[in-house]
Amino acid sequence: MPDISPLDVTNQRTLDAAFKHIEEEFGSLDVLINNAGISKDGGVSPSQLEPSILKETFETNFFGMFAVTRTMLPLLRERPNGRIVNLSSGLGSLTINSDPNSEWSRFNLLAYNSSKTAVNALTVMLAKEFKNTSLKINAADPGYTATDLNRHTGYRSVEQAAGIVVRLATLPEDGPTGGFFDENGEVPW
């Protein structure tokens, strides 16, 4: 496979180059896993967060995901059973965020959490648009996974987190679309 430039979800030029490469090399795309994400809240209370941090977070976590999806949709629609898996987070669940007894209630991160809530909305809206097609679009909560995003403080391995992503990427024809799932089933919105 020829070397291609890195994909930057905030740079349409790199998205177009990736599209062209996939189209020329493969002609279509079976699965799109949207996993770009940043968190720069830094423990700052929501009312004290700099607007620039909120904008930067949404630029990557939401607008970047939307741009990648929009760019790759023609390739996905070439397949009889295309799949889109949007990496979200339990922190994007309004139900979980509003529960003071949730294990996640201590994470009051305006930029990150609300960007993942927006990812969930994007998932629902796209699934509604393509409900009469074979394309399946779902959001995945991989859990608190040890990654660079959280300085490897998560208690789950990348391999554990990948389980729900793989399951959603390989859904059968009668599988769900427009849902939010973790390894235990549906996650509340």
Image (spheres, rainbow, N blue to C red):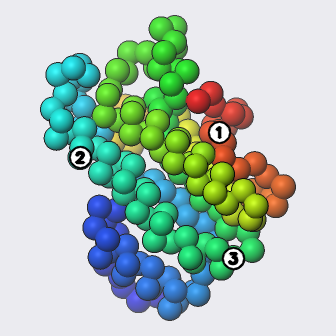
Quarter where residue 105 is shown: top left
Q: Which mark is residue 181?
A: 1
Left or right: residue 118 compared with residue 81? left
Left or right: residue 129 compared with residue 110? right
Mark 2 surroundings within 10 Å by alpha-carbon count, few (fewer than 14), some (14 through 19), many (20 or more)? some
- Relative to 43, does residue 134 appear above or below in the rendering? below
1 or 2: tag closer to the N-terminus:
2
Q: Residue at x 69, y 63 (%)?
A: 135
Q: Residue at x 58, y 49 (%)?
A: 125
Q: Can the viewer see residue 33 in this picture?
A: yes
Residue beneath disc 2? 56
Instruction: Work out whether residue 43 or residue 179 is closer to the camera in this orientation and state it.
Output: 179
Real-space CA distance between mark 1 and mark 3, rounded to the nearest whole angstrom:
23 Å
Q: Residue at x 38, y 78 (%)?
A: 16
Whether label 1 touches label 3, CB < 8 Å: no
Residue beneath disc 3? 79
Looking at the rendered structure, the kind of residue marked 3 is Arg
Looking at the rendered structure, the kind of residue marked 2 is Glu
- The mark lying in front, picked from 1 and 2, is 2
Left or right: residue 32 compared with residue 135? left
